[in-house]
C-alpha cells in the first residue's frame, strides 16, 4: 500500500462494479480519487465506501462533453494535476446481427469508444509527467460470442486506442495501457442476460465452470491490475493489454 501517495486519479463509471472496486484500491494506495457516473445515489454510496477524505464524486455522463469539462474542472481546482486516468465507463447489450439498429450502434459506441476518446482527450492538459492512462477493454474483443458483435467491436477499438496513444504520449512521459477482464461476477453481467437476482449466482457458477480458474473473477481482482498499471511498479509497461480473465483467452 501507499504506492500512489499524494497522487490524483480519475475513474469513470466509478459508482459500482469494477469502477468502484478500482477507486477503492487506488484510494487505499494513497490517491485522491475523482469518480463519475450517471446516478447520484450510487456515487454518494461509493464516496462513503471509499472514504470521504479520499474521494470526490462529480455526477456526469462520458458521452456529454460538458459533464467531462465539469469533472476535469474539479480535478484542476484541486491543484495537483492528474496522475491516473482509468477510462472504465462502458455500456453493453446483446443484439444479433439481423436486429442491430443505428440506435443500438450509437448506444454502445458513444459510450465505449467516443466516451473513452473524450475522457482521455480532455484529461491531456492536466496529466502530470509519469501519469498512467488505463483503458478498460475486454476479452470479448477476441471472441465471437453470439449477439455480442457491437460490444466486441467497441472493445477492439479501445485496445487499438491503447497502442496508438501509448505512442503519441510517450514523449510526455505518460504511459497508456489496457486491461481486458474476462467474466467478472458483477450484478450487471447477470442483468445483461435478463436474469433476476435469484438466478445471477447460478449464472455466474455456470460461466465460471468454463474458465481455467474454475470460477468467475472478482471486481477486486481487476482493481489489483488497475493499481499495478497505475503504480511505479509498471514503469516499463507501455501499450500493453493486461488480461484479467482466469485463463479464459489464454489456453
Image (spheres, grey):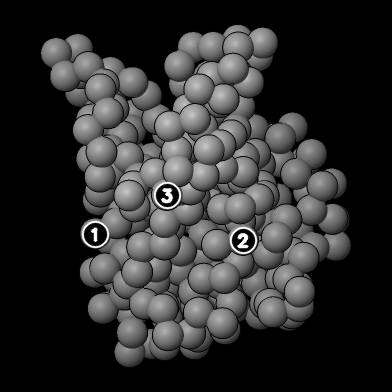
Asked if the residue under mark 1 is in contact with the one under mark 2, i.e. CB atoms within 8 Å, the reply is no
Task: State how far apart marks 3 and 1 are (Cα).
Answer: 22 Å
**Quarter residue 99 falls in:** top left
- Mark sitting on residue 224: 2
**Residue at the spot of label 1:** 160
Q: Nearer the viewer, residue 234 or 101?
A: 234
Position of 6 relative to 184 (above/below): below
Residue sitting at 33 percent across and 80 percent down? 169
- Give how far apart the Cα atoms at labels 3 and 2 are: 16 Å
Is 4 placed above or below 51 here?
below
Looking at the image, residue 232 sits to the left or right of residue 32; the answer is: left
- Which disc, if any, is residue 247? 3
Q: Nearer the viewer, mark 3 or mark 1?
A: 3
Does residue 16 sit above or below 177 in this rendering?
above
Where residue 150 sits, quadrant-wise, is: top left
* Local crowd size for mark 3, using a 10 Å CA cut-off: few (<14), some (14–19), many (≥20): few
- Front tag of 2 and 1: 2
- Of the two numbered discs 2 and 1 on the same chain, state the one appearing first in sequence: 1
Secondary structure under the numbered disc 3 in the rendered image: loop
Amino acid at each position: 500500500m501507499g504506492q500512489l501517495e499524494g497522487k490524483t486519479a480519475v475513474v469513470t463509471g466509478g459508482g459500482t462494479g469494477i469502477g468502484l472496486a478500482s477507486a477503492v484500491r487506488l484510494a487505499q494506495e494513497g490517491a485522491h480519487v475523482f469518480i463519475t457516473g450517471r446516478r447520484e445515489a450510487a456515487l454518494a454510496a461509493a464516496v462513503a465506501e471509499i472514504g470521504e477524505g479520499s474521494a470526490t464524486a462529480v455526477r456526469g455522463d462520458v458521452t456529454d462533453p460538458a459533464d467531462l469539462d465539469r469533472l476535469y474542472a474539479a480535478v484542476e481546482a484541486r491543484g495537483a494535476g492528474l496522475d491516473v486516468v482509468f477510462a472504465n465507463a462502458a455500456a453493453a447489450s446483446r443484439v444479433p446481427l439481423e436486429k442491430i439498429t443505428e440506435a443500438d450502434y450509437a448506444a454502445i459506441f458513444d459510450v465505449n469508444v467516443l466516451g473513452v476518446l473524450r475522457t482521455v482527450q480532455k484529461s491531456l492538459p492536466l496529466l502530470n509527467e509519469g501519469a498512467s492512462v488505463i483503458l478498460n477493454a475486454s476479452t470479448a474483443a477476441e471472441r465471437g460470442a453470439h449477439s455480442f458483435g457491437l460490444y466486441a467491436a467497441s472493445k477492439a477499438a479501445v485496445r487499438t486506442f491503447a497502442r496508438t496513444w501509448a505512442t503519441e504520449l510517450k514523449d510526455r512521459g505518460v504511459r497508456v495501457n489496457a486491461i481486458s477482464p474476462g467474466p467478472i461476477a458483477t450484478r450487471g453481467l447477470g442483468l445483461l442476460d435478463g436474469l433476476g437476482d435469484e438466478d445471477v449466482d447460478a449464472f455466474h457458477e455456470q460461466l465460471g465452470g468454463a474458465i481455467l480458474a474454475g470460477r468467475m473473477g472478482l471486481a477486486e481482482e481487476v482493481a489489483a491490475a488497475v493499481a499495478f498499471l497505475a503504480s511505479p511498479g509498471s514503469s516499463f509497461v507501455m501499450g500493453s493489454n493486461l488480461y484479467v480473465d482466469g485463463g479464459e483467452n489464454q489456453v
